[in-house]
Image (cartoon, rainbow, N blue to C red):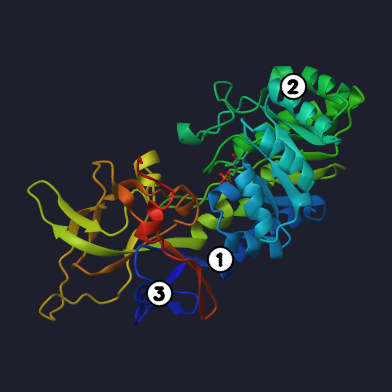
Amino acid sequence: MSLAVMQKDGLHVEGVALTEVAARFGTPCYVYSRAALTAAYAAYRDALQAHGLADRSLICYAVKANSNLAILNVFARLGAGFDIVSGGELARVIAAGGAADKVVFSGVGKSRVEMRAALEAGIHCFNVESASELAQLSEVAGSVGRRAPVSLRVNPDVDARTHPYISTGLKSAKFGVAFGEAFDLYRRAAALPHIAVKGIDCHIGSQLLDPAPAAEAADKVLALVDRLAAAGIALEHIDLGGGMGIQYRADEPAPTASAYLAPMLAKLEGRREQLVFEPGRSLVGNAGLLLTHVAVLKPGEEKHFAVVDAAMNDLMRPALYDAWHEIVPVSATKVGAGGTAVDTPMNYEIVGPVCESGDFLGHDRVLTLNEGDLLAILSAGAYGMAMASNYNSRPRAAEVMIDGNDIHLIRRREMVPELFALESVLP
Ligand SMILES: *Cc1c(COP(=O)(O)O)cnc(C)c1O
């Protein structure tokens, strides 16, 4: 939320005016701050340090939240590992300079091709989500003459109390091995020749603001670790997933990393296992914003619409989850068409040009707007560009990263011919 700071010439990110970014790279454009990425990582690390756990912890950034190579590279330089969910993400991590031996591989449907690639790269661990996956992984590992390092992702049946689409820890979810079946599956895994049992994993959901469910999940996981140890299966690491929520609205009481993690970390002090965490959103969400211009103002009888040049294909969260993003003007002063100051706030629906009624970026926003105004849609660093599509044959936005006074283009805007370059017509 605090990424952009208002100065006389409008909003700045670090030392750069957002009007300059828009002038150089056009809109829509995602803007990230290296300092904000670094600070979010440091907050996580410091929370672990406060419990004496930093030295034996591995923070694996969840790549799916934002997979741009420059973002991955910033985290790789800070010493992070990575949580991946596909072979494509593994290739990105390696291309960005990430260390394969700090990668954990999650996901319910890993293909054999992806398993082989990850084995050959030498990843830290597979987070296995079912008995069938375990059997397939053992076969693939045998065929390449390796033993696959494995955690079982257990489903602790804890209600994360978040949006149903991003709640993953209930019995009814497709994720993980049912808690009651995990012990037996560990025994079978330990007997498989091409499987090396290494750890345990759980991830109960995303955008969690209350620390209690994660602490409750940790309790259940630790009890299972101790039961396994008593049965002769000693685990080397405990992976407690990601999911820490961020502040999207100024009036939303989001916890700091240290407050959110404290109840869970208190349970881990004094243990000997390596600890793995998989934060995604909390490392990038508030380090990015989406810049957009007001294209058309359309006053109506019931509602006033502000049509902007960003749309649901650029930022899908409002349409997908009814998510709320703060939308703020970039310029400090308002000047109307005739050069006169315009200062009549109105209640707007902020919508994109896509042909869907679900294409909105914000409802009921009281703003003073003119056509051509530049707006910043805040907290857009996570699950923004990563979920972007070419729906309506719209080229995907440019992405820039600000580092002090420097602006780096980290993904150029797509060009229209690229959108159909892979297609062909019938002979
Ligand atoms: C998405 C995901 C994460 C990251 O979740 P955030 O809410 O972005 O922190 C971590 N682990 C797994 C297995 C995931 O699927």
Q: Position of residue 223 (x, y in %)?
A: 78, 27
Q: Earlier in the sequence, mark 1 or mark 3?
A: 3
Q: Earlier in the sequence, mark 2 or mark 3?
A: 3
**Badge 2 amino acid:** Ala
Instruction: Give the CA distance from mark 1 to mark 3.
Output: 17 Å
Instruction: Give the CA distance from mark 2 to mark 3.
Output: 51 Å
Q: Position of residue 8 (x, y in %)?
A: 35, 82
Check disc 2 and report its element: helix, strand or loop: helix
Residue that carries the numbered disc 3 in the rendered image = 21
Which one is in front in this view, the residue at disc 1 or the one at disc 3?
3
Residue that carries the numbered disc 2 in the rendered image = 182
Q: Position of residue 145 (x, y in %)?
A: 86, 35
Frontmost residue, 396 versus 37: 396
Quarter the N terminus occupies? bottom left
Residue that carries the numbered disc 1 in the rendered image = 36
Q: Residues within 10 Å of mark 3 (few under 14, many from 20)?
A: many
Q: Residues within 10 Å of mark 1 (few under 14, many from 20)?
A: many
**Badge 1 amino acid:** Ala
Residue 146: quarter of image: top right
Is 297 situated left or right of 48 in this image? left
Residue furthest right in the image? 232
**Badge 3 amino acid:** Val
Write the residue at 51% across / 33% down: 161
Labels in figure, total: 3
Q: Residues within 10 Å of mark 2 (few under 14, many from 20)?
A: many
Check disc 3 and report its element: helix, strand or loop: helix
- Check if mark 2's residue and mark 3's residue have beta carbons within 8 Å: no
